[in-house]
Image (tube, coloured by chain):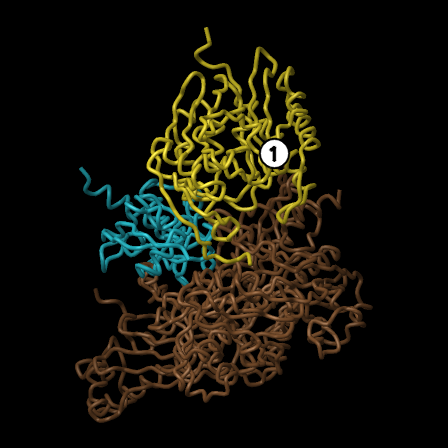
Amino acid sequence: MSVPFSISVTVNGVRYARPVRPNQLLVEFLHDDLELHGTRNGCSQGVCGCCTVLVDGEPAKACLVLAPQVDGGVVTTIEGLAPPGGLHPMQTAFVEVGAVQCGYCIPGMVMTAAAFLEENPRPTDVQIRDALANNLCRCTGYMKIVEAVKMAAAANLSAGSGGDA
Amino acid sequence: MVGSLILPSFAYVAPKSLAEAITTLAALGPDAKLLAGGQSLIPLLSMRLARPSTIVDIGRLGELRYIRAVDGQLRIGALTRHRDVERAPLVQVQAPVLAAAAGLIGHSHIRNRGTIGGSLAHADPAAEFPAAVTALEASVIALGPNGEREIPAGELFLGPLTTALLPSEILTEVRVPVPPAGHGWAFREFTQRSGDFALVSACAIVTLQTAAVATCRIVVGGAGPVPQRCVGAEAAVVGHPTAPEAPREAAALAADEVEAEDDLHASSGYRRRLTRVLVRDALEDAFARLHVPQATRP
Amino acid sequence: MTQPIAAIGSPLPRVDAAEKTSGHAQYVGDLRLPGMVYARLARSPYAHARVKSIDTRAAAELPGVVAILTRENAPALKYNSSPFDAVPGSRAMIEDQTLFDEKVRYVGDPVALVAAVDWETAENALEAIEVDYEPLPPVIDPEAALSRDAPLVHEGRSDNLIAHVKLAHGGDLNAGFEAADVVVERRFRTPRQKHVQLEPQVCVADWNGDRLTVWAPTQSPHQLRTKLAALWHLPQSRVRVVSLNVGGGFGHRVGFVLEPYATAMAMHLRRPVKLRLNRIEDFSNSENRHPMIITVKAGGRRDGTLTALHVTSILDAGAYAGVSAEVAHVHANVGTRLYRCPRRFDGYVVYTTTPGCGSFRGVGGPQASFSVEQCLDELAGALGWDPIEFRRRNSLRLGDPDPWTNLRIESWALDEVLDRGKAAIDWDAVRGPTLRDGPWRRGVGMAAMMHVSGGNCISSRRVEGSSALVRVNPDGTVEVFSGQSETGTGVATMVSQIAAAELSLPLDRVSVTLGDTASTPYDSGSHASRTAFTTGWAVKLAAEDARAQLLRVGAGMLEAHADDLELEAGDIRVRGTPARAVSLGEVARRAYHTMTEIVGKGVAPISNAPPYGAHFADVSVNEETGQIRINRYVAVHDVGRALNRSVVEGQIEGATAQGIGFALSEEVLIDPDGGSVTNASLMDYKVMTAADVPRIEVILVEHPDPHGPYGAKGVGEVGIIPAAGALANAVADAIGARVLEAPMTPERVLAALTETI
C-alpha cells in the first residue's frame, strides 16, 4: 500500500486539506474522496474526457493527473462551474438543444466546451468539433452537442454586445 | 494482469529545484521515474506497465519552462508545454515546423499539460516532437550528477520508449538550430482519428541557394522504432532545382529506405505506402513555402 | 415560469437534462453503502485452459482482503446471460455459464473474485493469486471451430455448433436462381464491435439474509430480477433491482453482466459489495457484437425482378452461448425480410475461445446491411438498374404479410423514404460518373431497411410486455411508475410527455419513477426499439385510465355526466360551460377523501409496427491512402410519429454515428494465436470523435402505424442498421471496387482498389 500524505487544494472555491495516496489519480480524489460525482472515470487513458476539470484554470483530464500534483492548486469541477442551483450558459444550451442522453460524458463535455468558448468566443464548426474531440460521446453522434456550443456562443455574443463598457 | 487501472504503489516526491531533483534522482537510483506533464507516463502507470519505486515530480519547476533565442538557436526549457511551443511567436517565426508539430499533438487538453521534454524523453516513435527535432537537427541537454551533456536528436532515440538518457539524468533543454530565413518546411501526418498518434508522419525542411536546393532534411515518424532520416531521398533533392516531379521521386526513395513495421493498426506495406504519399506532400509543401526573405532583398 | 401544456411531438427539453448537465445525476458507480466492500475479478491469461489449482493464500493474507471466492468455495450455478429466458415464447437458452468453471474459455474468463476494504487492496490481491493452468489449444477462428477435429469449447457437446438457424420465405429458392439472368455471390466479413458505453460495467449488491438488493445499470430491471430470483432460488418478492441512471446501454446491459458475481459475494459476506470492470476489462470481458462471415447469393432478371436471395452466415458467439441464437434470427430477418423474392437463411452459431458475444443495438442488422445491401447493389448494377429503383421494385408492400412477425403490414413509408433521401443527397448528380478531385474519387450510395418496434410477435410467439401506473396526487401533480430503465434514450421524458399530454398538463407537473422493481410495475426493459412503442402504449393507457377516473369523480362534484366533461389545462370542466370547472387537484383531493386514489393502470397491447429507413452517403475516397471522407450523410427514417422530435433525432443521430463507426473504424482485434484482445483501450479501439463523425442530416418521415401509440414506431436501433451498407455502396460507386470486409479501414480500401487496378 502507498503511504498517504496530505495535500491542500481548493476545489470549487472550498479549501481542503486531505490525505491522498501518491498513486491516487485526481479523478479518484474528486469522485471518491470529495464525492463530486460529476467527474467520472471512463477510460483511465485520457481519451474519453469524462473526467475533464479545470486545473489552475485550464482544462485537464483528471485521469492524467496524480492527486499530489494539484497540491497548492485550484480545481474546478462541473459542480463548481455555475453558482449552486444555477446553470452555466453552456449547461443551459445543452439542456435546451437536447444534447444530453445517458449523461455520463456530459459534465466533461460541458467543461471542455465552456473553457473552449472562453478562449474562442466566435468559433467555426470545425473548431468546435476539434475542441469537442477532447471528449467522447457514445450516445449523441455529437450533432446536438455541436449545436449546443453554437447556441451558447451566440447567446454569449448577444449578451456581451449589450452592456460592456 | 494488464488491464488493472489501479496504479501500482509508489512514493512521491516533488523537488523544489532542479538541483534538488538531480540529487533526489541520484539518491533513489534507477527505479525512480521522472514525472513532467504526466500525459504519457500516467497512462502507463494506470496499465501497470511502469512500476517505479518513486515518482519524482518535476512538473512544477518553473525554471524549466521557457523559450529563448540564443546564438542562432531556440532554447526551449524541457517543461515548456506543447501549447506554449505551438503558440509562441518566437517558435512560429523561427522554427515554424516545431510549432506546427506541436499543434498536431493529441487534443488541446493534452497539449495544455504535456511538455516537450516529457515527450522527447518518452520517445514514442509515432509522436510528433521526436520527428520534428530530428529533422531540425536539434539537440537536448541532459543534466546528471556529473554535470550536463548535449545529445544530438539523431542519437537520442534508441527504440520505442527508449532513449540515450541515463536514469540519473534529466532532460532540461531542447536546443533547436534556427533554420535560415526563407526555408521551406512541412509536417504531415496520417492518423486514424483526430488527435491519434500518426500511423506515419513526415517532416521536411528545405533551404535554397540560388536556384537549387542547398539542404534538405526528411524525417519519417511512426513507421519504425524511431524517427528516421531518409538520406537517400534527401540526396535526391539536394543540388537540384525544386522541380514539380522532385517530391514524388524523392518520396519513392523514402518509401524504399524507411524501416517500416507491422502493428495492430497497420501493416508495414501500408506504412510504406503512406510514407510515399506523406513525404511527397511534405516536400511539396516545403517547396511551396520556400521564399527569399524580405530582409535580404535589395 | 408556467410551462405550456405538453404536446405530443413537441421537442421539449428532457426532464433529466439539467441534473445530468450539472453533474448531479446518480449512477451506480457513485453509490457507497455503509460497510461496503470492493470486489474485483481475477482472470485467465489463457484463451483455453484447464484450471488445475488456485492458491489464494498469499492474497488472503494481505491486510484488508475480506474474502476470496473461487470454484472451491463458490456455489455451482448454471446460467445463461441472456434476458430472454425470462420472456414468454422465447427459445430455450443453453445454460453453459457458471461462476468459476474447471475450464477457462477466453482470455479474461474469471477464476476468482476478491473483496477488500478498498480498490487498491483488491487489485493487489488479484496479483497475489496463483493459478496453475494446463493450457489447451485455443479455438479462435470460427470456421476452424466448425471442423470435425476442432477442440471442444464445451465438453459434453458433440461439436462447437450452438445452433443452425434456418429460415425460408417467399417460395422456391432454386427455381428463383434458375429464373435469374444474373447471379452475384459475395463473401463478407464484419467486425467484433464493442458498445463502449462510457460508464464501465459496475454492480452493487446487498444481501441481508432475507432480501437481495442489486443496483445495476441494467436496461431491463424486471427481467434481471426474474433471472436473479431463478439463479438463487429466491422468491421474486425478495429480490429488488434498481438501475438508477444508466451510462449507456446499446444492448450490452439487457441480461446478466456482473450480477451473478456481485450477488455471490454479497451472499457470502452478508454485506454490500461493489464490483466493477475497468475499461480494459470492459473490452475483453464483456459481450461484443458478433463478428460474422456472411455469404450472400442473389439472382435477378433484367426486368429488375429480384428472383432469389440466399444468405449464409457464420456467427462467432465466443465462449458462451448467451443470446447468440436469437441474434442469428434477428440478423436473418433484417437481412432477408424486406424483399419479396424466394429467400433462405442459414446461420451457423459457433463457439470459439474468445470473449462472448451478445446483443448490441441493431442485433445482427448492421452485419446484414453491410453484406446483403452490398450484394443487392452489385446485382442491380449488373442488371442495369438504379439501386434505388431496384429496391423499390422488389420490396414488400402495404398489406403484405410480414414474414418476421406474421402481422400484416399496415403502414408503408419506404417509397417516401427513398424519394426524400434521393432528393436530399442529389443522387443523380453524383451517382455513376467518376468525379475526381486530385487523388479523391467521389461517389454516392444508399441502403434500405425495415425493422420492428419491440420484440412482440417476432420469431412467432414472443411476448415482451409493459405495464405502467399513473397516479394523480391530491395537489394535482402526477407520477408515472414504469419498470423501464433510463439508459439515456429519453424514456423518462417520453413517458412524462405522454402522461402530461393525456392529462393536459405542463411537463413539470409530472414526475416519473423508473428502474426500481420494488415500486414499479413490470416492463421487459429497454431493448429492441420497444421503449417508446410498448412502454409508451402502457403509459398512454394508464394516463387515459387516470383521466377517466378523474372525470368520474369530477362528474360527481360538478353534478354532470362524465361524458359531458373535458380536461383542459389542469381543469375539469363541463363542455360548453367553462365556468363550471374544478381543478385536477381538487378532484384528486376529493378522491382521497372518499378513499379512492386516482391510479390509472395501463398494459400495452401485443402489437408491433415496421419502421422503414434508408441512408444515403456521398463520399470521396483517396486512391493513394484509401481514406474515406464523408461529404454528406443523409439518414431518412419513418418513425410513425415522433413523440418528441429532439429525442427521436438524438436516437437516430447517435445510432447512425455508431453505424458509421462499425463501417469505418471500429473493430475489437483478437490475437489469432493467443486469443487476447490486442486493442482493449479507447486509445486503440477507434470510437470516432466529434472531429471524425460527419454532420448527419436526419429526415423524419411520419407514416403513423395504427398499432403504435399516437402512431409512433420504434426508433432506438434504426439508425445503426443501414449505415454500413450505404457507405460501402458509396465507396463502390466512387472507386469501382467492393470492400468486402468491415470496418473499411483505409488499408482495406486501398487493398480493394489495388486489386482492381
Residue C298 visible to an observer of this rendering: no
* Chain for colour brown: C
Q: Colour of chain B?
A: yellow
Q: Position of residue C40 (x, y in %)?
A: 48, 66
> Which residue is situated farthest in the right direction here?
C178
Is B227 situated left or right of B80 in this image? right
Residue at 43% across, 26% down: B92
Q: Chain of mark 1?
A: B
Residue nearest the observer in this picture, C566 or B214? B214
The residue beneath circle 1 is: B278
Residue nearest the observer in this picture, C358 or B57? B57
Residue at 27% across, 49% down: A9
Q: Position of residue B114 (x, y in %)?
A: 43, 40
Picture quadrant where residue C101 is located: bottom right
The quarter of the rendered structure image containing the C terminus of chain C is top right
Q: Position of residue C242 (x, y in %)?
A: 40, 76
The quarter of the rendered structure image containing the N terminus of chain C is bottom left
* Chain for colour cyan: A
